[in-house]
């Protein structure tokens, strides 16, 4: 998906109480998709690093990290495509 679709999906998911808990950016070059693992927002970060936050705070923290990731993608330049994972709170409740 594109950056615009990613942002729209995030807002749509958040309004339904869902979280994007995996965001993987790929730089499109010629016929290749080059993964940028250093920019990936993983479930371990979302549900591990943010485990002390309530669900709403976690969604807000992920959006902040996602916007930082997109800023870095802009600095790198080129066209990025994104894969995402979406979760409900019940899937991650302790």
Image (tube, rainbow, N blue to C red):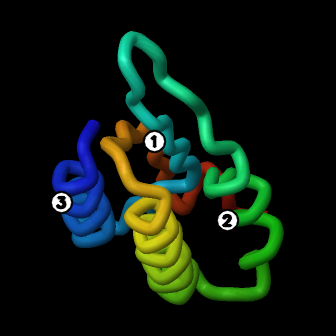
Q: Position of residue 30 (x, y in %)?
A: 37, 18
Quickly name the residue at label 1: 84
* Label 3 with label 2: CB-CB less than 8 Å: no
Q: Position of residue 59 (x, y in %)?
A: 47, 76
Q: Residues within 10 Å of mark 3 (few under 14, many from 20)?
A: few
Image-based side of 47 in relation to 23, left or right: right
Going 80% across and 74% down the picture, which residue do you hit?
Answer: 49
Q: Nearer the viewer, residue 33 or 22?
A: 33
Name the N-terminal-most of marks 3 and 2.
3
Task: Tell me the distance, in whole angstroms, between the alpha carbons under discs 1 and 2.
Answer: 13 Å
Relative to residue 55, is residue 76 depicted above or below? above
Q: Residues within 10 Å of mark 2 (few under 14, many from 20)?
A: some
Of the 4 image quadrants, the one containing the C terminus is: bottom right
Going 67% across and 65% down the picture, which residue do you hit?
Answer: 46
Going 18% across and 55% down the picture, which residue do you hit?
Answer: 4
Task: Tell me the distance, in whole angstroms, between the alpha carbons under discs 3 and 2.
Answer: 19 Å
Q: Nearer the viewer, residue 78 or 63?
A: 78
Q: Residue 58's quadrant in the figure? A: bottom right
Relative to residue 60, is residue 25 depicted above or below? above
Name the N-terminal-most of marks 3 and 1.
3
Of the 4 image quadrants, the one containing the N terminus is: top left
Q: Position of residue 74 (x, y in %)?
A: 38, 64
Q: Nearer the viewer, residue 49 or 52?
A: 49
Relative to residue 71, is residue 22 depicted above or below? above
Name the disc covering residue 94, or none.
none
Task: Tell me the distance, in whole angstroms, between the alpha carbons under discs 3 and 1.
Answer: 12 Å
As helix, strand or loop, the secondary structure at mark 1 comes to strand
As helix, strand or loop, the secondary structure at mark 3 comes to helix
Q: Position of residue 60 (x, y in %)?
A: 46, 84
Quickly name the residue at label 3: 8
As helix, strand or loop, the secondary structure at mark 2 comes to helix
Quickly name the residue at label 2: 46
């Amino acid at each position: 998906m594109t950056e615009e679709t990613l942002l729209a999906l995030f807002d749509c998911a958040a309004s339904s109480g869902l979280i994007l808990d995996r965001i993987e950016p790929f730089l499109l070059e010629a016929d290749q998709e080059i993964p940028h693992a250093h920019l990936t927002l993983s479930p371990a970060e979302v549900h591990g690093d943010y485990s002390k936050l309530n669900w709403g705070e976690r969604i807000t923290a992920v959006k902040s990290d996602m916007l930082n990731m997109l800023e870095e993608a802009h600095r790198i330049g080129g066209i990025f495509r994104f894969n995402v994972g979406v979760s409900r709170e019940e899937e991650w409740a302790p």
